[in-house]
Amino acid sequence: MAKINQAGGYTGTAILLHWVIAIGVLAMFAIAWYMTDIPKGTPERAYWFNLHKSIGTTIGVLVLLRLLWRATHTPPALPVTMPAWEATAARLTHALLYACLLAMPGVGFLASNFTKYGVKYFGVQIGPFFAENVQLRDGLQQVHQLLSYVLLVLVMIHIAAALKHLLIDRDGVFQRMLPGGSGRAG
């Protein structure tokens, strides 16, 4: 049975997970854009790819923890003044964000395990679990890249909606995800 948050804001755990995941995702975009231009076969490329895989794997685990937390702790209700279409859009966007945040590291991890390298998680070798398969790896990497574009759009929508609540609606929705934020309008 989920615990209901009566205070109007998210729990400290939910807020912490949100911001750690958000910072991780932004870091991943920056690293991904940087690392793809590094020449193949160089130690610098291996370093950045391994860092990307390590952070991505961590984000995947944190998203699973966030979903578990959310399943056991009911998030605060949306304001009653929010139009129905906007509430539906918020729920849909959050569901798609979570789906992408789970699928991206999962697909990336799987793709890495169809190479001879596997995943080096902050220096600890994980895999490869499968025989090297260039076709499967390439297909999974294409899915991973496509998901990155979808995730980028969803993140931009999420940020735009958060700023709308902060600057235009002034309904306290933005403040609920801040440490110590009450979620009260005004």
Image (tube, helix red, strand yellow):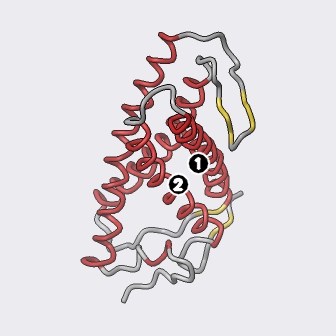
Q: Which class describes the residues within 10 Å of circle 1: few (<14), some (14-19), or many (20+)?
A: many
Q: Quadrant of the N terminus?
A: bottom right
Q: Residue at x 51, y 31 (%)?
A: 42
Residue lying at the far left in this picture: please name it.
Answer: 168
The spot of residue 60 in percent (x, y) is: 60, 43
Q: 78 or 29: nearer the eye?
A: 29
Q: Residue at x 48, y 22 (%)?
A: 140
* Tag 2 residue: 24
Whether label 2 touches label 1, CB < 8 Å:
yes
Q: Secondary structure at mark 2?
A: helix
Q: What is the spatial separation of the Cα atoms under label 2 and label 1, in whole angstroms?
A: 7 Å
Residue 118 in the figure: left or right of residue 96: right
Q: 3 or 20: nearer the eye?
A: 20
The spot of residue 113 in percent (x, y) is: 62, 22
Q: Is residue 82 above or below residue 40?
A: below
Q: Residue at x 47, y 80 (%)?
A: 183
Which labelled disc corresponds to residue 59? Answer: 1
Q: Is residue 107 above or below residue 32?
A: above
Residue 128 in the figure: left or right of residue 175: right
Q: Residue at x 68, y 21 (%)?
A: 128
The spot of residue 39 in percent (x, y) is: 42, 30
Amino acid at the residue labelled 1:
Ile
Amino acid at the residue labelled 2:
Gly
Q: Quadrant of the C terminus?
A: bottom left
Q: Secondary structure at mark 1?
A: helix
